[in-house]
Image (cartoon, rainbow, N blue to C red):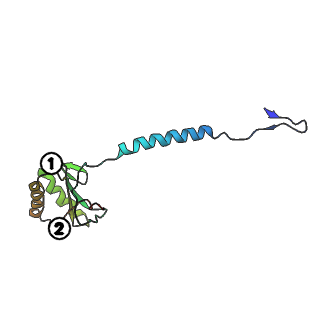
């Protein structure tokens, strides 16, 4: 299949059709745009707002309590009875001595105080609360 001009050997068309390639890329883009939000994991916690912005380090120990009262240590669900044992072990293995507490704002105040009291009894003196930064007007 070539074009003949009457002189010399026939030459073939060597153009690349990019339309199918663009179609495939657009379909992949749409698939990733739809599936990316579904792949996000984490604990659904509605944090209260505070006046101080907290700087949290990458290797921080974070104890979370969601709105249903479930306890987590760095995204791992733990029974409240074994939470303090695991916090002490993780703190001993970590270079960071501060334990951060994330608590849902719908929780009773007593639940957060009880958790902090348990940490103090376990020998953890450096406890910091994580809040959302205040809204700018």
Callouts 1 and 2 close, C-beta under 8 Å: no
Q: Which residue is mark 1?
A: 69
The residue furthest front is 137
The quadrant holding residue 96 is bottom left
* 1 over 40 or under it: above or below: above
Residue 103 x %, y % = 19, 55
The quadrant holding residue 16 is top right
Instruction: Tell me if 19 is positioned left or right of 110 in this view.
Output: right
The residue depicted at 54 percent of the width and 42 percent of the height is 25
Q: Which residue is mark 2?
A: 126
Residue 20 x %, y % = 60, 37
Q: Which label sits in the foreground, 1 or 2?
A: 1
* 58 over 82 or under it: above or below: below
Q: Badge 1: few (under 14), some or many (20 or more) residues near its Cα, within 10 Å?
A: some
Name the image quarter holding the N terminus: top right
Residue 98 x %, y % = 21, 66
User: Quick one: 5 or 11, which is closer to the camera?
Assistant: 5
The residue furthest right is 7
Q: Badge 2: few (under 14), some or many (20 or more) residues near its Cα, within 10 Å?
A: few
Helix, strand or loop at disc 2?
A: loop
Cα separation, mark 1 vs mark 2, equals 22 Å
User: Quick one: 76 or 117, which is closer to the camera?
Assistant: 117
Name the image quarter holding the C terminus: bottom left
Instruction: Tell me if 46 is positioned left or right of 110 in this view.
Output: right
Helix, strand or loop at disc 1?
A: loop
């Amino acid at each position: 299949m070539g074009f003949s001009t009457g002189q010399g050997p026939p030459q073939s068309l060597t153009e690349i059709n990019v339309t199918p390639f663009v179609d495939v890329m657009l379909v992949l883009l749409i698939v990733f745009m739809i599936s990316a939000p579904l792949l996000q994991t984490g604990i659904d916690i509605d944090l209260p707002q505070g006046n101080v912005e907290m700087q949290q380090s990458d290797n921080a120990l974070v104890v979370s309590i969601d709105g249903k009262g479930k306890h987590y240590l760095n995204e791992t669900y733990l029974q409240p009875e074994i939470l303090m044992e695991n916090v002490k072990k993780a703190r001993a293995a970590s270079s960071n001595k501060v334990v951060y507490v994330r608590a849902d704002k719908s929780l009773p105040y007593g639940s957060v105080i009880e958790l902090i009291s348990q940490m103090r009894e376990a020998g953890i003196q450096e406890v910091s609360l994580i809040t959302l930064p205040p809204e700018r007007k």
